[in-house]
Amino acid sequence: MAPPPAEPPRRRRPALAWLPRLGLLLPTLVITALCFVIPLGLIAVYSFGTVNQVNFDVYFGWTTQNYHDFTSTLYLHTLARSVFLSLSTTLSCAVLGFIFAYYISRQPPRAQQLLLVAVIVPFWTSFIVRTYAWVDLLQNLGPIDRFARALGLHGHIDILYTPYSIAIGILYSYLPLMILPIYVSLERIDPALYDAAADLGATPFRQFRRVVLPHAVPGLIAGIIIVGVPALGEYVIPEILGGGKTLMAGNLLADQFLETGNYPFGSALAVTVMVVLMLLLFLLRRAQPAVEAQ
Amino acid sequence: MTATTTTTTPAVDLAGVEKQFGDLVAVRHLDLQIQPGEFFSIIGPSGCGKTTTLRMVAGFEDPTAGRVSVSGKDMTGVRPYRRPVNTVFQSYALFPHLDVYENVAFGLREARVGKAEVRVRVAEAISLVQLEGRESSRPRKLSGGQQQRVALARALVNRPDVLLLDEPLGALDLKLRTEMQTQLKDLQRSVGVTFCYVTHDQGEAFSMSDRVAVMNLGLLEQVGTPEDVYHRPASLFVADFVGKANRFRGRVTDGSSGVYTVDIDGIGSRRVPGPDGIPSGAEVVVVVRPENLRATPAESRNGLTATVIDAAFLGAVRTIRLQAAPLGELTSAAGGAGAAPAPGSTVSLTWDENHAWLIQAGD
Amino acid sequence: MNIRRHPVAAPLSLLILLFMWVPLIVVAVNSFNTQTIMAGWGGFTTHWYSLAWHNEDVRTGLKTTLIIAVASSVLSLFVAVTGALWWRRASPKARAVYDGLIFARIILPEVVFATALFFLFLKIHFSLGLTAIVIGHTVWNSAYAALIVQARMAGLDPALEEAAADLGATPWRAFRRVTLSALMPAIVVAGLLAFTFSFDDVVTSVFLQGASNSPLPVVILGMIRFRITPEINAIGLLVMLFTVTVMSLAVIFYATAGSLGRAGRRGSMLDMYR
């Protein structure tokens, strides 16, 4: 073997090797940092500012006045209603979604695909038109009202333009988003597990509890996040099915920015909504291992 | 380490090559030469650095020290697409969106080879690996063995100076693997391209290679022909890696170049061949392969005796496990046609003094 | 339908399916109804369709929405693909931040985001209008696109680009001939998805349109507010058919062309959730 030469090794390290990688990241940086993070930060900062009601200039000074304004009953009421509506519809979504996802997962593969398509296709149609359809359906003298009266109801159903119609609207729009992750979790269950459980003495009910439920939990939690969080900030549904009255946080927020012009107060509202959301997320993430351990 | 003096330019020359990944030293000071036209294998356990070495020849890794040359030209730091080297990957890495023809033609298209010539050379390569008729198939429609042959054709069609193969037969079942080994050997012979083959399977490497390099923990333990490495291992690691080895500890009492007199613990003085330059008094290990350790029914209590633990019949060979206190457990291998020794019986063990080898202890 | 095995789940699931489809059917039926729903079925007519077609706002709205949807899809794809390429060689910490930002963009209620962006544009005196809307859409569209493209990228054998380099392709040619081609199905699907989301969007468009022409969904919202009922059904049915067609194309494309890659694994939209 030849003796090793005493040459220093040649290394080609091009200058600014990090530049191409930065270039790849640049579009994402612009879109996320510039157009997402910074605006949200701006809002947070200005929530501590004040507005001159005459010429709509915003002064930046540290004040928590906006948050104090918040505690006035009207706004707290609205926020509380938003949280309550969102939570209740998310829970209903979870129950109904779970039933449907479970049913799909127990079908043969062809039927599964068909059912999935059947529940997803409505989701692909125009959101606003679908929501509007419920106006027609739920109005007094509409089909549901006449159906109820035919069954013996006195008076009218009076559902439209109440929190109930909003709840139905949210439930309707977000149900597919709940079904999908639960279905994905359930679909993973090896059919042999049912047999194994039965072999070890489990009745169908206990099979359900000890095989199906644990597998469904990750999907359930994912679904609750995907549904609950955006539902809190819904704007279109309360706008259309709530009759244009500001019934939820989303409408209130839009109103402050587009109509009233009280930007600092609106910012405080936005920040509050975000804080509530993060709390929700945090709690859900914590709950996950505890529920799974069940 | 066996040295090969030659005046031809090596196909691959690694000089003082080292590779470090952060704190991990994958390859330490490697000096290695591969001769043109030879089937060269690098073997060793997982993590020994053989794949890293291959990737440094291909250009996917740059050495942290040392020089990599191909066909006499310094290629250190040169990008893979500028090297006269082609690789057959372990996962084959066939382009899924291209059919067999376009996969094979890929390198030719990058080299801007004319359409007519592409057609001729691709056809040549495809018939070389016996895949005629499958030109318009997509990779996912082919079996593992077929995919592997496409990968081969895709590499060879470019007429590289060196063909690198990274455990290409790993995903195939045993029968197919043995078939492919023969085919690869024949292919290399007929095409004449230098093959650099990496595998953890010693038997596979031995069956195909002209020379073999054994690596362990980033170091080159030995380079030589399969026979060299098997019968004259340079270290205990090599001795154990390429086959089973019976070991006897002892001390050199006499001898110099080639043959030594060794005082073996529990046995006595024996003549044992070994590498040059072992000093007198040195602690050594005598390595005797099972097929060279003969067990015969004990006639006397002279010499080395052992008790049979059990015997396993493997068809062509019978391996006999023996207890020879205080030397420990030994293994003997004999042809399957002979009689099976009874467990518990006493046997005499001998070996032909030419069929042992000396390794200096501490290696 | 195995009612015997699922006495509770089966009928409920049927009800749920009906629940999903009834509103669509109502819209479809009423778009041809001479009378408004209050009075029941009054006879077949295409009057509402011709009304909608001749409505200037609707036509402008459609044109505006198409421009926004195409522009936003293209931009979102650009962001998603470059981001995914960066992600391949990124450190775990950087990746975590990147993934977190995708999650945040998808989860955050659109209203909160729209107000924040509106406020930013206000402060820096960036004029609202088409460009502003496109930027707004791209922020969340790129998140969905990134998910799809990245899922596909993760399924690609990393050795493919090495193989291309080994065979003489420079990094750019390796990207073009191998990576981009293998990513194409995901890119098409992500683009179609982004297009649909943009086409359907209300909130961001409302906040960022300023004084310019409204996109179609905002026009529809206005019509709902002023209770111009029957035309909406006609427009609604057409829009629904359009978006369903686009999404179906995307899914079909993904299911067929998506089966390239390692060991021919068949792709599915649900892979996003895995």
Image (cartoon, coloured by chain):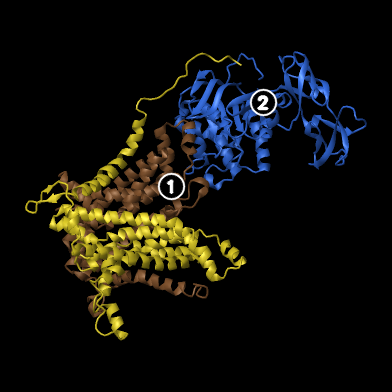
Chain colours: A yellow, B blue, C brown
Camera-side residue: C248 or A37? A37
Total numbered badges shown on the rendered structure:
2
Q: Chain of mark 1?
A: C
Q: Position of residue C61 (x, y in %)?
A: 20, 57
- Residue that label 1 marks: C152
Q: Are marks 1 and 2 on the same chain?
A: no
Q: Amino acid at mark 2?
A: Asp
Q: Is residue C11 left or right of residue A58?
A: right
Alpha carbons under labels 1 and 2: distance apart: 43 Å
Secondary element at image label 1: helix
Q: Position of residue C216 (x, y in %)?
A: 22, 59
Q: Position of residue A101 (x, y in %)?
A: 44, 65
Q: Does residue B291 sit above or below C65 in this rendering?
A: above
Q: Is residue C143 left or right of residue C56?
A: right
Q: Is residue A27 visible?
A: yes
Secondary element at image label 2: loop
Camera-side residue: C103 or A27? C103
Q: Is residue C235 visible?
A: no
Question: Residue B3 lies in what quarter of the image?
Answer: top right
Q: Chain of mark 2?
A: B
Q: Does residue B247 sit above or below A47 in this rendering?
A: above
Q: Residues within 10 Å of mark 1 (few under 14, many from 20)?
A: many
Q: Position of residue A199 (x, y in %)?
A: 62, 66
Q: Identify the residue at horizontal 56%, vertical 65% (top origin).
A: A194
Specify the farthest residue to the right. Answer: B299
Camera-side residue: C217 or B125? C217
Specify the quadrant that holds the N terminus of chain A: top right
Q: Which mark is residue B210?
A: 2
Q: Does residue B39 sit above or below A262 in this rendering?
A: above
Q: Residues within 10 Å of mark 2 (few under 14, many from 20)?
A: some
